[in-house]
Amino acid sequence: MAGRDLPSGMQIAPSLLSANFGCLAEEIRTVEVGGARILHLDVMDGHFVPNITFGPPLVRSIRQATDLFLDTHLMISHPLGFLEPFVRSGADLLTLHAEALGCEDGGGPSEAGIGRFNEAAASLRAMGCGIGLSFRPATHPNGWLQRVGEQLDLVLMMTVEPGFGGQAFMGAMLPRIQVASQLAKERGWGYQVEVDGGVSVETARACFNAGARILVAGSAVFDCEDRIAALGNLRKAACGRACVTNGGLGA
């Protein structure tokens, strides 16, 4: 990517959707102290998903409060019209949904969807921002990744239906995480695989074993008073003691 690189190694990315917005700067500091290097920002428009969260102005405020990597997940119906506002507000990487770009029946990419992706990728590269692609549980990633995998910095696999936090993890998505991870290894592509939805100490190891190296955790972090312990426990659950050092780095 042209701007800041995603932190390498095993990472827990706290989702601010579960934080207390009344004291957001303080909430961010608690996960910084806990070793988080990535913040996950869930942007919802009330149309693509049945919930509304926040837009570029709040991202700008978050950027003023922290230097952590801002992994910004656009769960919105028309992402191309909002790329520049989010980048200008301080997002380091924007993840777009395949379904918002354009899918054929069965979830594969439409030619129009590929065209929109290429337009978004070129625009984000020019602005020094990374690009990710996300998939709802009903959308298989293989067709999309075969076409655009080489351009990606991140592949985000949803293990819940997007829209609300606190949902149960869908274990049936693990083979898709493996598909995304294996394709990157076979083709020499540089993207990292991220999992979002129901991540906890009970599900983190399965995600890690399937090839995910960024685990988004909302309630599993922000519902705990001790954020240092919460983040450490998630890292340990994912990959053992070896990755509970150096701010979450590990195999």
Image: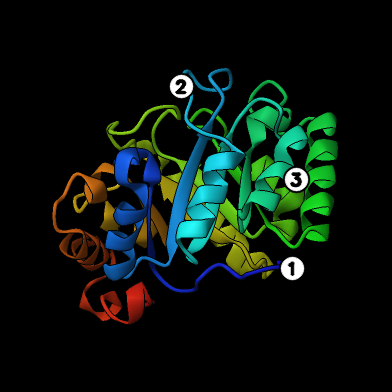
**Which element carries disc 1, helix, strand or loop?**
loop
Give the Cα separation between the discs numbered 2 and 3: 23 Å
* Location of residue 189 by image quarter: bottom right
Between discs 2 and 3, the one toward the N terminus: 2
Between discs 3 and 1, the one toward the N terminus: 1
Q: Are marks 2 and 3 in contact (CB under 8 Å)?
A: no
Give the Cα separation between the discs numbered 2 and 1: 32 Å
**Which element carries disc 2, helix, strand or loop?**
loop
* Location of residue 223 by image quarter: top left
At which x and y percent is residue 62?
48, 52
At which x and y percent is residue 83?
73, 43
Q: Which residue is drawn at 14% across and 58% down?
A: 226
Q: Which residue is drawn at 69% across and 68% down?
A: 3
Above or below, comparing residue 50 to residue 2 in the picture: above
Inspect the image, locate mark 1, and give the three-letter code of the amino acid beneath it.
Ala
Above or below, comparing residue 23 to residue 76 in the picture: below
Query: Mark 1 highlights which residue?
Result: 2
Q: Residue at x 44, y 56 (%)?
A: 39
At which x and y percent is residue 84?
75, 45
Q: Is residue 26 visible?
A: yes
**Which element carries disc 3, helix, strand or loop?**
helix
Q: Which mark is residue 51?
A: 2
In the picture provided, is 152 more to the left or to the right than 169? right
Instruction: Give the camera-side residue of 146 and 64.
Output: 64
Quadrant where the C terminus sits is bottom left
Query: Mark 3 highlights which residue?
Result: 84
At which x and y percent is residue 8?
49, 73
Q: Can residue 140 be seen in this view?
A: no
Give the Cα separation between the discs numbered 3 and 1: 15 Å
